[in-house]
Image (spheres, rainbow, N blue to C red):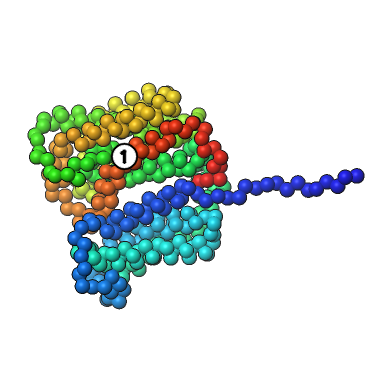
Amino acid sequence: MARTEPVVEARASPRPSPLARYLLLAYVLLVIYASLYPFSGWRDQGVGPFAYLSERLPRYITAFDVVTNLVAYMPLGFFALLALHPLVRGKRAFALSSLASCALSFAMEALQTYLPSRISSNLDLATNSLGALVGAGLALFFGAGLLGRGKMHELRHRWVLDGHQYDLGLVLLGLWLFTQLNPATLLFGNGDLRGLFEEVPAVLHPVEVFIQMEAVVTACNMVAIGLFLSCLAQDGRPLRGLLLGLLAAALALKTVAVGELLKAQTVFAWLTPGALLGLVAGALALMLVLALPRAARMALAGLLLMAATVLVNLAPENPYFVDTLQFWPQGYFLNFNGVTHLVSLVWPFATLFYLLLLAPRPAGAGSGGADQL
C-alpha cells in the first residue's frame, strides 16, 4: 500500500507594504520642508552645527511648542515601523524606526543653525525624539491591525484595487485632504503658481466674477476628485458613501483651517455663494459622470483638473478674505502654512502625472498584490 505524504498548506509569506513606504516617504519630505522653511538666507553664523546640543534649555518654553514637536514626529515613527514590516519586526523594528526618526530630527536641528530665521534647540530634538518613540510604540502594538490580516488590510482590499500603483493613489488622496488645511485657497482649489513669479498688479473685478470663478473651480475639482476616487475603487462597490465621507472630511478640514489658522470671524467663512453654488453643481454633475467607463472617467478627471488649475491662476482676489489675508497673523503656524502651500501648489501637477501613468493599465492590473496594504 502506497504511503501517503501529509499535505502541507502553503501560506503566502507577508510582503512589505508599498502604502506604508509611500506614506513614510511623503511624510519625511513634509518634515524636511517644514523644518527648513523658508529655505532662504543660508549663512554661517559662527556657531557649530552641533553646538545646540550642549546649550541650556530655552528660557521661554511654551506648551504649544512642546506639543507641536511631539505630535509632528509621532506619524514619522509610526510610518517608519510599518515600512520596515515584515523585514524587521518587534523590538528591532521599534529601535530602528525610532533611531532613524531621531537621526532625522538631529540633522534638521543641525541644518537650522545656518538659517537665521530658525533656532536650533535641544528641547526640540528631545520632544521630536519622544514623539517618534511614541509613534513607533503605537505601530508596534497596533500594527498587526494595519498590516497582515487586520481590519485595515481587509478594508483596503475590499474597496480599493490591488497593486502598488493604487496605494500611491491613496497617498495622493490623503495629500489632497491635507491641502484643505491651507485657508488661503479657493474651496478645493490647488496649483496657484502666481506666488512664484513677480507680483501682478491687482485688477478690480465685480464680485460676480469671483463668484462664478469660484463656483467653476469648486465644481471642477469636486467632480475630478470624485472620478479619481472611482478609478481607485473596486468594481461594484457603492461609491456614494466613500465620496460623501471624503468630501465631508475635506470640508471639515477647511472649516478648521479657516477658524483656527485664519482666525476668521466665523469658521464657515469659506462657504461663500460661489463655493455653495460649486458644491451643488459638482454634486449633480458627479452623479451623472460616475456611470462612464473607467477610461473615460480617468480622462475626464485629468481634463477637469487641468481646467480648474488654470482657473485658479486666473481668479481674482477673494473679496471675502482680502483684508484678512493681507494681515494674516500666521505666528506659530508659519512653517505649517508653508508646507500646506507647497503641497497645494504641487498636488494637481503630481496627480496629472499619476493619471498619465495609470491610464494605460487595464482595470484588473495589479491583482497579484493581495498581501500588500
Q: Nearer the viewer, residue 184 or 118?
A: 118
In the image, residue 16 above or below residue 312 = below
Q: Residue at x 41, y 50 (%)?
A: 23
Q: Nearer the viewer, residue 106 or 57?
A: 106
Callout 1: SS: helix
Residue 213 at what x, y percent from top left?
20, 30
Residue matched to label 1: 349
Farthest right residue in view:
1
| Residue 55, quarter of the rendered image | bottom left
Residue at position x 47%, y 54% from top? 83
Would residue 265 be seen by someone viewing this image from the given angle? Answer: no
Q: Is residue 288 above or below residue 115?
A: above
Task: Give the image location of residue 67, x and y in percent.
Answer: 32, 61
What is the three-letter code of the residue carrying label 1?
Phe
Nearest the eye: 24 or 126: 24
Left or right: residue 111 compared with residue 232: left
